[in-house]
Image (tube, rainbow, N blue to C red):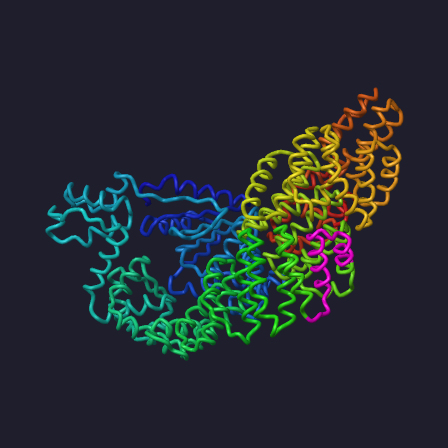
Amino acid sequence: MLHGRAEEQAEIERLLAAARAGRSGALVVRGPAGIGKSALLDHAAEAAEGMRVLRGVGVESEATLPYAALHLLLRAGLERIHALPDAQASALNGALGLGDVAPESRFLVGLATLSLLAELAGDGALLCLVDDAQWFDQASVDALLFAARRLEVEGVVMIFGARAGFQAAGLPELRLGGLDNDAAAALLPADLPPQVRERLVEESDGNPLALIELPAALTAEQRAGRLSPVGAMPVADRVQEAFQARIAALPEAARTALLIAAADGSGELETLVGAGASLDALETAERARLIEVRGRSVGFRHPLIRAAAYQSAPVTRRLAVHRALADALTRSAATDAADRRAWHLAAAAIGPDEDVARELEEAAERARTRGGHVAVADAYERAAELTVDPVRRSSQLANAAVAASDAGLMGRAAALADSATPDADDPDMITALIQVRAHREFELGTPLAAGRIILDGVPRVAARSTEWATWLLVEAVRCSWFAGDSRLAEEAAASLRALPEIDSPLVGGALGLARLLHGDVGGGIRLMDEAVDVPALGGLAVPGLTFASALCLPLGRVSRYEEITEGVVADCQRSGMMGWLAIALRDHGFAQGLLCRYGQARATLSAGLRLATELGHEHAVRHLTSSLAWVLAHQGDARGWRTKAEESVARADRQGQVLAAAIGRWALGLLELGLGRPDAALEQLSAIPPTGVGAISAADQVEAAVRSGRPERAKEPLDRYLTWARHVRQPSSDAVALRCRALVEEDEAHFADAVRLHEQGPQPYEQARTQLAYGEWLRRARRRADARAQLRGALDTFDRLGAELWAERARAELRATGDVPAAPRRSDDPLSVLTPQERQVVLLAANGASNRDIAAQLFLSPRTVGYHLYKAFPKLGVTSRAQLAAIAPPS
């Protein structure tokens, strides 16, 4: 029976009931040591009648072993790994050390974990209990949180018990405080005097473990009521002190056995005995209710007991025990024995030790093959502490920095990189450290600072590796594009031109982008155009393809933009490159928006925003927020997104994210135009820098200036847009250029030519905008019949695209001609009734993908995919997958 936890128990029981009904859930039970987290997890296990239960407990000493905790948690269900898709089974087997080396994708392991939990739930339900989660190794935490955040309808409940410091953003929390006085008093022995009971309740602060353990530590005098004054020692320290007193009362052999168990942490009976713990001594400790021996496993009854056993021992005994454990592990057949041995040797080292450092390096490389980036960083960093040779030490720190960066720990990565003094003759190491420092700045949202870091470091690389120097300078130009800084772009381009030429389309693309930012539109467009068309583009890896796809935006090559980004998204999903996937989804969603596929764009960008938020990639979050607002602005959908776009612009301005701010302002300007507020639109659009996106958005600025009655403010953006359109030579941009001239010059011939030219382009939204403007001009010229033809065409397109604000403007104009337009109708997009995630699932299903394939692409469980299809079918009026192909657009 749990005292004082009725509400918390009820919350857990609601989760279990939902799981039995097929709905999943996750919960973090958070609180200090001894507050009752494990007791609540025990209650969950007892209440999970008819459910399968998995349980794992974190051990502090194993936090450096990648996927050790995940293996412990899942070991009772590993027989079902074969039911997973091959790539996921391979990844999970490799991560757990059960099969061949897996690709370096921690998110693929997370997806495999989600799939395995869903598989183990079967047609019933599954409870997954994660106790002392703050001590799980980071690789295991990443996999479990990945799964927990994607639970929907698998019938799985995941409950994490954790102290402060365990990061689980996005999951609901249940914070445990101390028990109230009545519940606290109920835990105390009934024979204590009232004043002693009151004092213990007060000093325990309602901590259940303290209420249970502190009475046992009282002397006869204290039990009689003669208590010392209240001290300032924290509750956990008081309880640990009580445990230390109990340990001190044990025989020497039992104390040694407890110290060995505390230093080891794995609980493997064979290892403990091999290191000198006798069975009799362990039995003595078990009778004292300090440990539990279950089969061949030994565990402490509470983590504070383990801490007490370890911290109360003299340093010399701790070092000796670690050496004994290392020796015992040389004879162990456990898959992680070599890694644990290395860490025990490191714990026993009191000064530099090259041999131990070498074993840690080997442990790091084993962790790398399993995708345990944090473990790699930990091992290399500790190896550096034990290494005297400065060159080797710098190499270790560089490896640690790269691993920390791969794990997303950008602050730690930068600190490690700053600690390294790389060998001047090792371009690989120098480049890695430059990229770590620059990557941190970029993801923090300061692309200009990232570019400066690269430029400052390139001279050290250029003399030794032209290839590495070239790639770094391409990255510097990319930073300048996001920062909107022409000076950085020109400096990087000058350095590129000074290098021996290498055969890569990225070089021409970077030089062209630099020219564009510097104001040379024609020269820049020519070089970039050549770069995105070369056959060699297909041989580029994801980072290079991402850069190449970004060139398509200023080129006005929207179809090519979508083509490249679609491939990049697929590559990232296949390989599990989640950081790059967030960027690829942003680019692909923007390309879909340019092609007026607004429903698809919303789904793509929403998925990217969710992923970037989960990853903590601030820069990508800003871009995705601005891009999503831009898509919604085309449809006149301002629900909540005006505020988000304004906040995104303000934050991007503060951090020098010029491109993100420009797209956000473009979105706000478009929205104001749709609402018929040209003055407000002009204010937003005029704040966009003239190069880059400013060239494309200039057409909207022209319209805002004309409609606000300030044609003099249309001249500069008109010249800017005409210059850009003349060089990109695309039908849609040429048509929009004619529309801009028609608005400024009030020349019907330009309107008529623009409407004809739009027929050759892939952007019906722009065509409808031109027809609307032409129809308005014709109505003002009292040519109502001609006006109606244009306005009806505009209305039909706006309705079809779901551009509600623009459709209403077209209706108003038609009414002004004396026409009676049809009532507003739903978008012709048959999938407009779906949520973004339902849309993604339906599009893939319509193209023949199985539930398992869809789950792998969207990082969901197959059961969740089935649930989304179940919800989508009645909305679409279909009853089978075969019918989807007839109504869903190609994906």
Residue furthest to the front: 712
Name the chief secondary structure element in magenta: helix
Question: Which of the image's four quarters has the N terminus?
Answer: top left
Q: Nearer the viewer, residue 781 or 867?
A: 781
Q: Is residue 740 left or right of residue 236?
A: right
Query: Magenta includes 510?
Result: yes
Q: Nearer the viewer, residue 273 or 506?
A: 506
Query: Residue 180 at what x, y percent from top left?
Result: 29, 39
Picture residue at 54% right of the left edge, 45% below the top: 654
Query: Residue 448 at what x, y percent from top left?
Result: 58, 54
Residue furthest to the top: 818
Q: Is residue 474 left or right of residue 217?
A: right
Query: Residue 143 at what x, y percent from top left?
Result: 52, 57
Query: Magenta includes 663?
Result: no
- The image shows residue 131, relative to residue 867, as above or below, that is below
Q: Nearer the viewer, residue 561 or 132?
A: 561
Q: Would you say residue 349 is visible in this rendering?
A: yes
Picture residue at 57% right of the left edge, 42% below the top: 648
Question: In the image, which residues are magenta?
Answer: 500-529
Picture residue at 20% right of the left edge, 65% below the top: 250
